[in-house]
Amino acid sequence: MFMLDEIVAHKRVELERKKREASAARLRDKLAAARAPRDFRGALKAPGISLIAEIKRKSPSKGEFRAKFEPEQLARAYEAGGASAISVLADEAFFGNGASVVEQVANLGGLSLPVMYKDFIVDEYQILEARAVGADAALVIVRSVPDDRQLAELLALAGELGMGVIAECFTPADAERALGAGAKIVGINNRDLQTFEVDIRRAGQIRALLGEDIVTVSESGMHSRSDALQAQSDGFDAMLVGEAILSAADPGEAVRRFVGREAEGGAAEEAAAGKEGVAG
Ligand SMILES: O=P(O)(O)OC[C@@H](O)[C@@H](O)c1c[nH]c2ccccc12
């Protein structure tokens, strides 16, 4: 069995337990009281390539990312650094932090970025939970939902609740299913889940198959500003980055580098201002 199948199988068992602890009806009550959703799609569509910066404690292939896991500090550093949205893993078993961390970040005082609930979604219960904990968006891996009708229903439910939703694809066939199900935001994962190999050119090829009205996100395995510029020139609106930021000594600084803001502040900014003065 390969990793995605294994995680999804585990997720189904976990969901049975969660549903016993808190029914879907209870989640609907809770989400009625959640803060209003923030505009995720709009945040990704802003000029330039937008960054969705990720919060996860660990991953199956890389282990723990930081000696001390401090989601609130990370979220604040991401916002200050110029990220456009924050993705928070909601899978405790494989990624080390569950829905309670999504809730913590989504309701953090002073934070204004939209927050995405990132899980292996196979059931509408998870979409309800996402909104109930205050998330503004969710991610659905197209391949984890083989039934076309169920895929369309999951995307529609997120829309009804006012959330944005990324339909995550690996292949052109996945992308076709995503569009058929009504996806408005399509993510293309650069990491092959069978081999864990990363190839960011493949995403560009799949991007080319999608219309201009679809908001697109290049996901995984991006390490530098030049990867970001590659995605931008391939026509992506946004990128989803975790490891490169989480494993940096200063995650806020890593965010600034990805969005091309590293010249701001300090000596670089003064030099730029000086040059402008001479030119003007
Ligand atoms: O840490 P990376 O390589 O920058 O990748 C981030 C994100 O794309 C990755 O975590 C991811 C993309 N889709 C997923 C689905 C489930 C779990 C994780 C993911």
Image: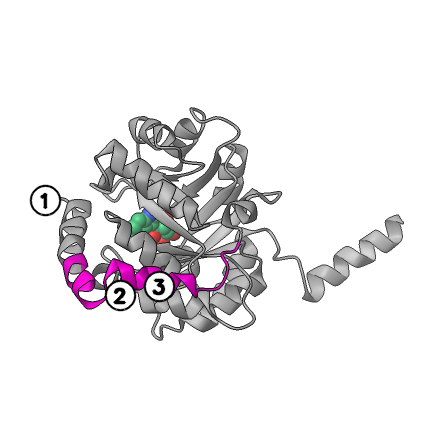
Q: Secondary structure at mark 2?
A: loop
Q: Which mark is residue 68?
A: none
**In this rendering, which labeled residue sits more in front, label 1 or label 3?**
3
Inspect the magenta stretch and tell me whether residue 241 lies in it.
no
- Give above or below for 170 relative to 46: above
Q: What residue lies at 39% left-to-right and 67% top-to-bottom?
A: 103
Q: Tag 1: Cα neighbours inside 10 Å, few (<14), some, or many (≥20)?
A: few
Residue flagged by tag 3: what amino acid is it?
Asp
The answer to whether residue 249 shows anywhere in this view is no
Residue on which disc 3 sits: 29
Q: Quadrant of residue 66?
A: bottom left
Residue in front for this viewpoint, 257 or 79: 79
Q: Which mark is residue 1?
A: 1
For the residues labelled 1 and 2, the Cα–Cα distance comes to 21 Å
Looking at the rendering, the stretch of residues picked out in magenta corresponds to: 15-38
- Give above or below for 211 relative to 165: above
Disc 2 beta carbon < 8 A from ligand 1?
Answer: no
Q: Secondary structure at mark 1?
A: loop
For the residues labelled 1 and 3, the Cα–Cα distance comes to 38 Å
Residue in front for this viewpoint, 138 or 77: 138
Q: Earlier in the sequence, mark 1 or mark 2?
A: 1
Residue flagged by tag 1: what amino acid is it?
Met
Residue on which disc 2 sits: 96
- Farthest residue, direction top: 209
Q: Earlier in the sequence, mark 3 or mark 2?
A: 3
Q: Tag 2: Cα neighbours inside 10 Å, few (<14), some, or many (≥20)?
A: some
6 left or right, relative to 253: left
Q: Quadrant of the N terminus?
A: top left
Pointer 1 with pointer 3, Cβ within 8 A: no
61 left or right, relative to 219: left
